[in-house]
Image (spheres, rainbow, N blue to C red):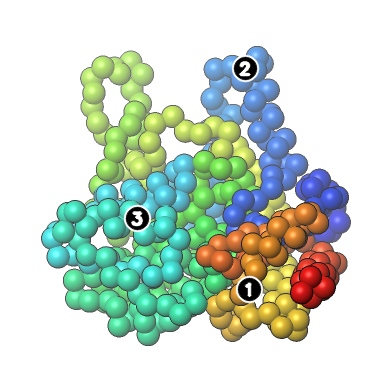
Amino acid sequence: MPDIQQLRTYFPHTRHTIYFNHAAMAPLSTPVVEAINRLVDLRHGHDISNFGYALEKAGEARQMIAHVLGTTPEQIAFVQNTSLGLNILALGIDWKPGDRIAVPDCEFPANVYPFVNLERRGVQVDFIPSEEGVVTLEAIEQTLQPETRLLAISWVQFLSGYRIDLKEVGALCRERGVLFAVDAIQAFGALQLPDTVEACGMDFFVTGGQKWLMSTQGQGFFYISPRLMEYLVPPMAGWLHGPVDWEHLSDYNLTFHPDARRFELGTPNAIGLVALHAAMELYMRMGPAWVEEQVLARSRQLAEGLEARGYRRYGSVDPRHASGIVAIHHPEPEALQKFLSRRNIKTAMRNCKVRFSPTYYNTEEEVERVLAAVEEFEQSRIEAE
């Protein structure tokens, strides 16, 4: 079992700040910072033009990601962020007027706008009804139409923290002949898949690294299934979309890689790739099972403590759908968030809800201190009346 006190030394902010905002932006660990500095040091004068270090780390990162997802490195493509990955999906399908896409009505805009943008091509977006960020299998089933070609949904909803059953939804999509795309940014690095991506029936799985994986902004990846790879056309072309013939660069022979690298556009984000590699190494060293156990334990402790103090949780209280996100209703959400921030407790406010998102290096003691601070805020409200 990992030593959590040793782990916390990788995050120096823990000496003065309780950070419960990993669903927005995560801190960088010491191993990630050291990896970035190593690359910067090379570019600073030791080996300026050698891109080999970053490419080596990118290859290893691709292998680690594939291992976690239960697939092969050939099915993994690097992209700058989740939005770009979803746009590649949206723009790469040969849509016909009358085609439909199903999307929950509680999604973060990044998983909505790429598909709404297709309406000018005659594609209709059907919004799956939800209640407080809870999307049921029945609601999905009722929304899918014979013309539905794609379901795009988050593994974990950004505000409610509701975790869908990927295998149930994947089975439904396969039964209906619908492509299944998953926005995983609020889960990857915190939760484990219930099975391999193939066994879950996923055709597309995309995430960025800056949240639960605790890497940098501007670097993510996606998985693409073999069946989707057969007909998803790269909507953009760049000089690294295929093998590079350095002796005949002016021949302009556009040949795509046979694997997911065909979707990678131009010169890669070297700093982002080495950071992603280091973040994946730390995640693997801690162990995905232990990470999930810790994340769920802290969020459960927090949710139960808030409920005991009279706060109503936004979303589901069913532990089968739990994640690292806990959001609550509050009559003065902005005031509560600012109060906590002044006490070096970092949270977020989304849609007038206060959102907490602890991760695996956070401790039971930190949760108790957060709960005590919430009590202090309520006492200050009473005294001000």
Q: Which residue is mark 3?
A: 113
Q: Is residue 295 left or right of residue 362?
A: left
- Residue nearest the observer in this picture, 193 or 66: 193
Q: Position of residue 146 (x, y in %)?
A: 19, 76
Q: Is residue 313 left or right of residue 361?
A: left
SS of the residue under disc 2: loop
SS of the residue under disc 1: loop
SS of the residue under disc 3: helix
Residue type at mark 3: give it: Tyr
Q: Position of residue 214 (x, y in %)?
A: 64, 50
Residue type at mark 2: give it: Asp
Residue at 44% across / 43% down in the picture? 79
- Residue nearest the observer in this picture, 110 or 331: 331
Q: Which residue is mark 1?
A: 331
Residue at 36% across / 64% down in the picture? 152
Mark 3 or mark 2, earlier in chain: 2
Mark 1 or mark 2, earlier in chain: 2
Q: Which residue is mark 2?
A: 47
Residue at 27% across / 43% down in the picture? 235
Q: Quadrant of residue 328?
A: bottom right
